[in-house]
Image: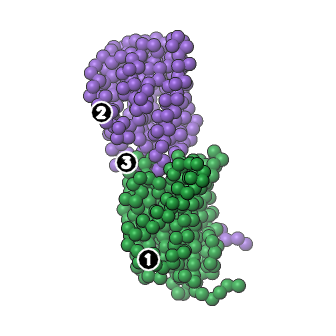
Chain colours: A green, B purple
């Protein structure tokens, strides 16, 4: 039976195996997880894209996302008072500890678990964003219609260059930002594969479809939102890339709109 | 009845596909006359066909061809395989390898600038250097340029010696894998088949996958090691 706690947020996330991995029979190396913890008034999205060159890319992405998710769940609100450096240090330290532990268990190297990392966590006062490596985060301000990046994209000269959580320079490349939750309307996290259809690189703008996702998220239940997101990833978005695709979206709801989001895993 | 919400194609953006600039520097000096030049022409045609058959390589390969025999000439500017003109190679003259490599590096640099201006992502470019002899011009400048680019991970050079007279020492100096492959002219097609697969493998590498360049180098080194068995026709 549903409790009567109103939800401030609605969110959903989906990962879809791309055409390249489908043709080779390999796993999807994108992992995205989300939680809408109404009792804690906390919404969390974490996305990781395993490095194609890493032998345990999928596992690395799973471990990285679950570690960051646990960190935000277990530490509840105190992390909002951390400085950016402290937050980066705590998150990256935990992720590397988890990956190192797994590497030891599997007699593998740390870089075998390489992945990028993106997250968004929304509390009552602040909404935080973090990113290591490629992929895109879009943020929408209350009252606005155009989505913006929370920080400048890290652009390397060559496509096959990026930073992973396991890279030597991961700490220095770790970008974080926050917004006042009162001004926060919504955010979207996407892997580079999903970005092929949802972010126009040369125009530096998000696709119209991101606005559509926002409308769905503010008007429909998390289940319906997730289904629609999955159909979009498996359908038109998939035709735009060979890569795996993943998207997580989280919106702040107006009082008048209360989709029947439930406290569960998406 | 299930809901049918789904994004439409016109709500999505089209980003241009990432490109892999590949510059072929082909020795067409007088010593290539006869069967070698005919085999080289056939092998390049087969290379284009192999690229066409692979969807991912097809949209990624961005090819230019430079010949050096007597003088240095650009036979084709960077484009996909379908825009490549028919390969018309005529063997004549000496072997201005240094000038050819420098020209290729300039072309690659210009191409990167153009792609960048067009907002097109690109992979680390490749220079494929093929010769059956030794350079007849000064190569020191070209060697320095190549060495610096390779050290800075901005270029992959694949060096191919055609036949027994190829100066492998010089070709090795240019190579980013630290080795040059000697092949018989009848095996050129096999090399270009490998090359098309390598283009495909890079195009299939995840954006963000740093190892694609080293994998190509390792694969090329393997090819060099195995390559000795390809040279039976010359008795190597």
Horizontal side of residue A20 vs A136, given as left or right: right
Asked if labels 1 and 3 share a chain, the reply is: yes
Badge 3 crowding class, 10 Å Cα cut-off, few under 14, some 14 to 19, many 20 or more, is: some
Where is residue B110 drawn, in percent x and y? 32, 39
Q: Looking at the picture, does residue A116 appear above or below residue B196?
A: below
**Disc 2 element:** helix
Where is residue A107 drawn, in percent x and y? 58, 48
Report the chain holding disc 2.
Answer: B
Number of numbered markers: 3
Badge 2 crowding class, 10 Å Cα cut-off, few under 14, some 14 to 19, many 20 or more, is: some
Report the chain holding disc 1.
Answer: A
Upstream in sequence: badge 1 or badge 3: 1
- Inspect this view and state whether residue B12 appears: no
Where is residue B166 drawn, in percent x and y? 41, 16
Q: Residue at x 52, y 29 (%)?
A: B222
Q: Residue at x 55, y 57 (%)?
A: A101
Q: Quadrant of residue A248?
A: bottom right
The image quadrant where one finds the N terminus of chain B is bottom right
**Disc 1 element:** helix
Looking at the rendered structure, which numbered label has been put on residue B145? 2
Please name the residue that numbered disc 1 is placed on: A80
Disc 2/disc 1 C-alpha distance (Å): 50 Å
């Amino acid at each position: 039976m549903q409790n009567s706690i109103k939800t401030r947020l609605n969110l959903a996330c989906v990962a879809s195996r791309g055409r390249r991995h489908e043709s080779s029979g390999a796993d999807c190396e994108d992992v995205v997880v989300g939680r809408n913890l109404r009792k804690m008034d906390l919404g969390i999205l974490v996305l990781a894209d395993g490095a194609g060159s890493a032998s345990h890319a999928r596992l690395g992405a799973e471990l990285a996302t679950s570690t960051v998710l646990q960190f935000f769940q277990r530490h509840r609100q105190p992390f909002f008072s951390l400085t950016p450096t402290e937050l980066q240090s705590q998150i990256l330290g935990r992720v590397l500890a988890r990956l190192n532990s797994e590497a030891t268990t599997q007699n593998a190297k740390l870089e075998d678990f390489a992945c990028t990392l993106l997250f968004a966590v929304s509390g009552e006062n602040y909404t935080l964003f973090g990113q290591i490596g490629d992929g895109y985060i879009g943020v929408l301000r209350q009252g606005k219609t155009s989505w913006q990046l929370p920080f400048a994209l890290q652009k390397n000269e060559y496509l096959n260059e990026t930073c992973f959580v396991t890279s030597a320079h991961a700490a220095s490349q770790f970008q974080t930002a926050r917004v006042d939750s009162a001004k926060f309307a919504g955010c979207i996290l996407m892997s580079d594969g999903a970005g092929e259809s949802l972010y126009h690189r040369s125009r530096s703008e998000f696709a119209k479809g991101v606005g559509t996702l926002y409308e769905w998220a503010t008007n429909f239940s998390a289940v319906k939102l997730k289904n629609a997101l999955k159909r979009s990833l498996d359908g038109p978005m998939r035709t735009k890339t060979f890569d795996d695709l993943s998207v997580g979206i989280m919106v702040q709801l107006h009082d008048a709109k209360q989709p029947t989001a439930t406290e569960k895993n998406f | 009845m299930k809901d049918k919400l789904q994004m439409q194609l016109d709500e999505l953006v089209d980003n241009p596909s990432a490109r892999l600039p590949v510059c072929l520097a082909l020795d067409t000096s007088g010593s290539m006359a006869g069967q070698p030049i005919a085999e080289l022409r056939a092998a390049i045609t087969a290379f284009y066909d192999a690229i066409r058959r692979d969807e991912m390589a097809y949209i990624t390969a961005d090819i230019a061809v430079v010949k050096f025999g007597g003088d240095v000439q650009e036979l084709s500017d960077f484009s996909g395989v379908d825009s490549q003109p028919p390969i018309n190679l005529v063997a004549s003259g000496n072997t201005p390898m240094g000038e050819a490599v420098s020209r290729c590096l300039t072309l690659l640099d210009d191409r990167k600038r153009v792609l960048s201006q067009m907002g097109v992502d690109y992979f680390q470019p490749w220079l494929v250097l093929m010769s059956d002899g030794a350079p007849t011009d000064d190569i020191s400048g070209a060697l320095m340029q190549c060495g610096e680019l390779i050290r800075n991970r901005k270029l992959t050079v694949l060096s191919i010696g055609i036949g027994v007279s190829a100066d492998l020492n010089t070709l090795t100096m240019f190579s980013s894998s630290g080795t040059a492959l000697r092949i018989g002219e009848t095996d050129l097609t096999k090399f270009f088949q490998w090359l098309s697969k390598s283009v495909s493998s890079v195009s299939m590498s995840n954006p963000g996958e740093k190892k694609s360049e080293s994998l190509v180098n390792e694969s090329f080194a393997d090819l060099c090691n195995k390559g000795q068995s390809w040279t039976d026709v010359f008795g190597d």
